[in-house]
Amino acid sequence: MHSVEKKRRIVEETLRPHASVARVAQGCLPEKRKQVRQARARPVLDALHTWWEANYGKLSRKSEMAQAIQYALGRWTALTRYSVAASCLSVG
């Protein structure tokens, strides 16, 4: 498996719980979707970001986990866009 694909799969697995937030918000009006995401997803995403930053430096740069964290942090804006935008329909 290509290394970018591996990193993407690790990040997807980490973010899988956020799919349930998307299901809860599905069918809601945009402003309600935004409220649900900010209340349920944003705190978890922020905690995950804090954990990634705190632990990234402790890992070997060659480890799959470190590479996945680096990949996710590099795409943080895109990863969190659904939690702040009322118009986004899903997390991926």
Image (cartoon, helix red, strand yellow):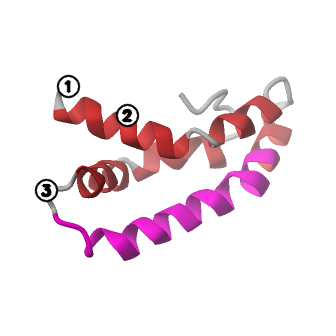
28 or 68: which is nearer to us? 68
Residue, far left: 62
Choose the circle earlier in sequence order: 1 or 2: 1
Residue 15 location in percent, x, y?
53, 43
Q: Is residue 31 above or below residue 76?
A: above
Asked which secondary structure carries label 1, the reply is loop
Within the image, what quadrant is residue 56 found in? Answer: bottom left
Q: Which mark is residue 1?
A: 1
Question: Pointer 1: residues within 10 angstroms few (<14), some, or many (20+)?
Answer: few
Please indicate whether residue 30 sits to the left or right of residue 43 in the image.
right
Q: Are marks 1 and 2 in contact (CB under 8 Å)?
A: yes
Q: Which residue is tagged 3?
A: 62
Query: For the magenta stretch, what is the residue range?
Result: 36-60
Residue 26 location in percent, x, y?
79, 26
Q: Is residue 14 above or below residue 54?
A: above
Residue at image point 36% right, 49% down: 72
Residue at image point 28% right, 55% down: 70
User: How much space separates mark 2 and mark 3, taking CA atoms?
Assistant: 17 Å
Residue 21 location in percent, x, y?
73, 40
Q: Which residue is tagged 2?
A: 9
